[in-house]
Image: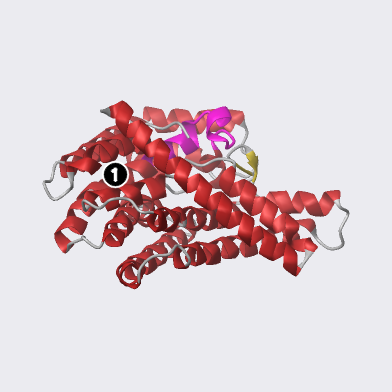
């Protein structure tokens, strides 16, 4: 059954790619009709969206749609594809706020435009140009996500059902993003705060809300079904973010597309770091302060911090938490409220979300 689920997911992934490519072509043509100077904007966004991406959010939305026992329709594929544009907005702004140099093995958007400024010998301050461009491109991706949903060809009832969830998802995402940057200003590390950030910044908008959106688009959703989907989506969303936290510290740069130990260099107060702090002695905490969050953190400093995280037991604890949360999610899938056609996809997506290396 796993191979059939993989094939079904790939089919939807391919359909999403086609919808995104068509939409981006139309929008790029519109931008360049305004001014040829906007060509780099459309090129950068198209490359960012089409050159890579797992399409997890549309796949979860599709699974939510199937969970209600509905049969797939063209407008629904276009509607769920719009979630990729929201993801682009989040990533572009996230890289800017974190000062990340790369994304998926290529320069992040603000660095890309900063480099353009230098190469073309433009007037003004290159980093400021890159910063402004990234803010605007992220905003544009957010506008386009809404536009793509609006022009998908949904019925008025589908729009009525999906918009409240869509709005809530975007509000939760922005709330999580602010809590994330606010956490970096705190004098203490707190596990509960870090857990909430993981839930709102990533987990809910990656899994739970896309599932709800898919179910809402079916027209067959009930409060009970949405509750069951949350019982699957919330723990799995947290497990997804915890895997991300581990990759941010221990991931292979050639696979993740991000520099080694990037989260350590950025001083990210993740659940992994909160677990490490909780299990550390005062002398270990003092030692970690010399390296954690240092912009010039080198490979030696990264190794020292990695060893602290491992020796504290935090890495092992995180793996245990991921497995435990995934089991909670898999138990929820067994509910009779979820149409059996969605079961294999939800099981396969749980593996993809938590066993990944990127």
Along the line of sight, which residue is nearer the eye, 311 or 327?
A: 327
Asked which secondary structure carries label 1, the reply is: helix
Q: Residue at x 58, y 39 (%)?
A: 104
Provide residue 352's location: percent of width, then percent of height.
Answer: 37, 35
**Figure coloring:** secondary structure
Q: Is residue 300 above or below residue 291?
A: above
Question: Is residue 149 covered in magenta?
Answer: no
Number of marks drawn: 1
Q: Residue at x 58, y 65 (%)?
A: 139
Q: Position of residue 40 (x, y in %)?
A: 73, 55
In the rendered image, the residue lying farthest to the left is 336
Q: Quadrant of residue 138?
A: bottom right
Q: Using the rendered image of the protein, determine whether residue 281 is visible from the camera's viewpoint.
A: no
Q: Could you classify mark 1 by the number of other residues whose Cα lies within 10 Å: few (under 14), some (14-19), or many (20 or more)? A: many
Taking 102 as reference, is 153 above or below it?
below
**Badge 1 is on which residue?**
236
Can residue 236 be seen here? The reply is yes
Check residue 245 for magenta coloring.
Answer: yes
Q: Residue at x 62, y 59 (%)?
A: 26
How far across and how far down the image is residue 333, in percent? 19, 42
Residue range of the region highlighted in magenta in the rendering = 242-261
- Please name whichever residue, 234 or 182, is drawn nearer the observer in this view of the structure: 234
Horizontal side of 37 relative to 142 (left or right) equals right
Q: Would residue 185 be found to the left or right of residue 324 on screen?
A: right
What predominant SS class does the magenta segment belong to?
Answer: helix
Question: Measured from the top left, where is residue 347 in percent x and y?
Answer: 26, 36
Q: Which quadrant, please, contains the N terminus?
A: top left
């Amino acid at each position: 059954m796993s191979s059939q689920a993989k094939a079904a997911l790939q089919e939807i992934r391919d359909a999403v790619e086609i919808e995104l490519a068509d939409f981006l072509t139309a929008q790029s043509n519109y931008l360049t009709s305004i001014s040829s100077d906007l060509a780099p904007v459309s090129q950068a966004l198209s490359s960012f969206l089409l050159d890579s991406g797992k399409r997890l959010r549309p796949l979860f939305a599709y699974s939510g749609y199937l969970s209600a026992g509905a049969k797939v329709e063209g407008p629904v594929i276009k509607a769920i594809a719009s979630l990729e544009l929201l993801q682009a907005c989040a990533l572009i702004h996230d890289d800017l706020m974190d000062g990340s140099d790369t994304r998926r093995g290529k320069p992040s958007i603000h660095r890309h435009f900063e480099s353009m400024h230098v190469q073309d010998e433009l007037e003004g301050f290159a980093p400021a140009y890159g910063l402004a461009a990234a803010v605007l491109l992220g905003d544009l991706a957010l506008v386009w996500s809404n536009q793509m949903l609006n022009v998908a060809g949904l019925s008025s009832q589908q729009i009525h059902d999906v918009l409240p969830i869509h709005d809530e998802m975007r509000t939760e995402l922005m709330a999580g993003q602010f809590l994330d940057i606010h956490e970096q200003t705190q004098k203490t590390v707190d596990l509960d705060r870090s857990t909430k950030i993981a839930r709102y910044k990533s987990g809910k908008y990656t899994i739970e809300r896309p599932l709800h959106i898919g179910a809402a688009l079916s027209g067959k959703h009930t409060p009970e079904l949405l509750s069951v989907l949350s019982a699957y989506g919330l723990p799995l969303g947290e497990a997804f973010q915890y895997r991300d936290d581990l990759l941010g510290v221990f991931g292979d740069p050639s696979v993740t597309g991000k520099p080694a130990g990037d989260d350590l260099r950025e001083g990210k107060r993740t659940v992994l770091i909160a677990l490490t702090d909780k299990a550390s002695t005062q002398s270990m905490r003092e030692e970690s302060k010399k390296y954690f969050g240092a912009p010039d953190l080198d490979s030696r400093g990264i190794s020292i911090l990695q060893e602290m995280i491992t020796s504290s037991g935090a890495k092992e604890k995180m793996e245990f938490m991921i497995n435990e949360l995934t089991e909670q999610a898999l138990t929820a899938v067994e509910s009779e409220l979820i149409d059996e056609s969605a079961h294999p996809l939800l099981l396969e997506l749980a593996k993809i979300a938590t066993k990944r290396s990127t």
